[in-house]
Image: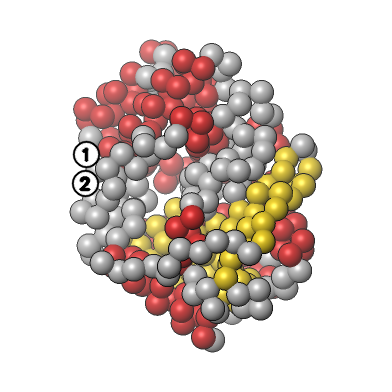
Amino acid sequence: MVELYPPIEPYDQGMLEVGDGNRVYWETCGNPDGKPALAVHGGPGSGCSTRMRQAFDPDRYRAVLFDQRGCGRSIPHASDPATDMRCNTTEHLLADMERLREHLGIDRWLLHGGSWGSTLALAYAERHPQRVSEIVIASVTATRRCEIDWLYRGVARFFPEAWERFRAAVPEADREGDLVAAYAHLMDRPDLQMRTRAANAWCAWEDAVVSLEPNGKPNLYSDRPPADQLAFVRICTRYFAHAAWLEEGALLRDAGRLAGIPGVLIHGRLDLSAPVDTAWELARAWPDAELIVLDDSGHQASDSKRERMLSALDRFARE
C-alpha cells in the first residue's frame, strides 16, 4: 500500500471574512517557508479532510487547505435551510480563493485537487494564470452539461435498479425531466425529513456509480455525518443544476491560458463518474500538461493514484 506523508496538524488557521455574511475556514500546514500549495476539495460541498494534508511533503510545502462556502467548518453551513445559497456560486468561490491568497501573502501557489476540485482549480488558473506555479489534478472534470447528464442519467444503463430508486425519490412529475434540478428544489425545502430523504437517495446513487471500482471505499457518500451529507447534497445539486455557472466547454476552450504552467492530470480508466475523455481533451488543449491514465483505477483513490500524485507533488517541490 502506498503511504501518504504522516499526519500533521496546522501551524496556523482561521476564519476569513469573504462577504455576504460568509466566513471561510482555512489552515496552513508544513513548512512556513516552503513552496505554497493550495488543496482544492471536491464535491462541490465535501469540505476538506485531514488526509488532504498528507499529500504534501511537510518539509518542502506550505500547504493551504480551505473549506469552500457552506461546507466543512465554513459558516453559515448549507445544512441549515436558512442559509442563503444565492451567495454560493463558482464566482464566489474563485473570489474567495484569491482573497485567501492575498490574506496569506502568497504570490504564486501550486493547485492540487480532484473531481469538482479539478474544475475549480482549472477555473481559478484560467482566471489568474500569473498566480499559479503548477497544477496537479486527479479525476479530471470540467463540469460541462454533458458530464452532468452522463453522471445523473447516462450512466444509469449500468445500474438500472439503483437508477429507479434514484428517480423514485423525486415527485413523479419531475422524473422524466431534470432530476438534478428536482433534487436541488427538494434540498431547499424547510422540511428536515424531506431533505434527509432526498440527501440519502442522492448519496445512494453516488455510491452505486462508484461501486464497481476495484479500489473503492463502500458507502463513500452515505457514511458522511448527517449535517455534512445535507450540506454536500444541497451544494452539489445547486451547482450541477446550473452547470457551475460555466459556459459549456469554456474550461477546455480556454485551456490555452494555462500555457507555461506545468500540469499533471491523473485519471482512472475505470472512472464511470467522470469518463476519461474530459481529461484527454484537456491534455490535448493544454500543451504543458502530462496525462497519466491508470488502467486499475476509477474515480476514488487507489495505490497507483496516490503513487502518481505523490510523485508529481514531490517533483514540483524539488523544482
Which residue: 39% across, 27% down?
200
Compared across the picture, whether 257 is left or right of 166 comes to: right
Which residue: 52% across, 51% down?
48
- In the rendered image, residue 28, in percent from the top left (x then y), is placed at 62, 63
Work out whether residue 30 can be spotted.
yes
Mark 1 surroundings within 10 Å by alpha-carbon count, few (fewer than 14), some (14 through 19), many (20 or more)? few
| Three-letter amino acid code of the residue under disc 2 | Leu
Compared with 109, 230 (above or below) is above
Figure label count: 2
Quadrant holding the N terminus: bottom left
Quadrant holding the C terminus: bottom right
Between residues 9 and 102, which one lies in front from this camera angle?
Answer: 9
Question: Nearer the N terminus, badge 2 or badge 1?
Answer: 1
Compared across the picture, whether 198 is left or right of 127 comes to: left
Compared across the picture, whether 275 is left or right of 45 comes to: left
Mark 2 surroundings within 10 Å by alpha-carbon count, few (fewer than 14), some (14 through 19), many (20 or more)? some
Which residue: 77% across, 37% down?
21
Q: Secondary structure at mark 2?
A: loop
- In the rendered image, residue 176, in percent from the top left (x then y), is placed at 38, 21
Label 2 and label 1: CA atoms lie apart by 10 Å
| Three-letter amino acid code of the residue under disc 1 | Phe
The numbered mark at residue 158 is: 1
- In the rendered image, residue 149, in percent from the top left (x then y), is placed at 40, 39
- In the rendered image, residue 122, in percent from the top left (x then y), is placed at 56, 61
Between residues 32 and 235, which one lies in front from this camera angle?
Answer: 32
Tag 2 residue: 212
Compared with 70, 178 (above or below) is above
Q: Are marks 2 and 1 in contact (CB under 8 Å)?
A: yes
Q: Secondary structure at mark 1?
A: helix
